[in-house]
Image: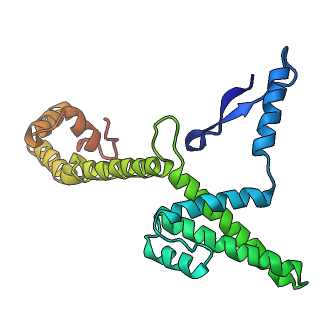
Amino acid sequence: MPKIVKSGVGMMEHARLQYDFVGDNPDEDIKGFKKYAMTSIIGFDERRERIAAGFRAVLHETGDLDLTSVLVLHETYNRYAEDALEHLVAKWLIEYHHMNMERAEIASSSNPKNLDYLVERSVELGRLQERIYWRQGIDPATGKNRETLGLAGKRQVKNGQQGNAMRTDNSFGVRHSLHAQDFVADLSKRNPHLTWADLQRAAAKEFNVSVSTIRRELTNPKKVGSSRSE
């Protein structure tokens, strides 16, 4: 029997059938593949028409019945927000209509410009179809559509960036390091017998932070050119 295996990586992961024609019992796999081929392997035109029929069914639910009219499709396209499924589906059907027109013209004309238009329409169809499937496709691991997951991930990253920025803006080094450095320098001049460890403890108490923060952010005023860790 064919196995269901996962293919793709990350958000593009999907399930597919894997057949084994050389194993110990290939008959079931051969039979299954033949059945699959009879029902699923179709011509390019039929595949596109099936997709178009599915998209027309989406728009039928909006009340638009004459979906052979490009004018109606344009009205639907303009009625919805650019990320709405109805907007994307109407745009795909418009491009599909133009592609078929270009194919008909190429069949009856030798104008090479028509081929350029056909290629452009085909590329746009593929881009829109990928956009629709990405927006509507369900991630099997979470049950959520992939666009929702992508946007959630974007928000999480942005929230993390904003949090890091806030922590940086509010950090001791940004808010107090210059003042604290002047504090230990002045304290050292007035009390030359104090060690760097004494100065660190005094600054930590003055600014209500840990000694390790002072050690990390400040420089020993007794050692010109010394590192902050000294």
Q: Is residue 23 above or below residue 100?
A: above
Q: Is residue 127 left or right of residue 136?
A: right
The residue nearer to you, when weighing 179 against 132, is: 132
Q: Where residue 59 sits in the image (x, y, percent)?
A: 52, 65
Q: Residue furthest right?
A: 110
The residue nearer to you, when weighing 11 against 109, is: 109
What is the image's colouring? rainbow
Residue 219 visible within the image: no
What residue is at 68 percent from the left and 74 percent from the top? Answer: 97
What residue is at 55 percent from the left and 43 percent from the top? Answer: 11
What residue is at 65 percent from the left and 73 percent from the top? Answer: 95
Q: Residue furthest top?
A: 24
Residue 4 picture quarter = top right
The residue nearer to you, when weighing 150 against 178, is: 150
Q: Is residue 196 above or below residue 83?
A: above
The residue nearer to you, when weighing 187 against 99, is: 99
Q: Is residue 205 left or right of residue 29?
A: left
What residue is at 85 percent from the left and 14 percent from the top? Answer: 24
Residue 20 visible within the image: yes
Q: Where residue 101 sits in the image (x, y, percent)?
A: 75, 78
Name the quadrant of the N terminus: top right
Residue 112 picture quarter = bottom right
Q: Where residue 164 sits in the image (x, y, percent)?
A: 31, 48
Name the quadrant of the C terminus: top left
Q: Is residue 229 above or below residue 114?
A: above
Q: Is residue 101 left or right of residue 21?
A: left
Q: Where residue 75 sits in the image (x, y, percent)?
A: 50, 79
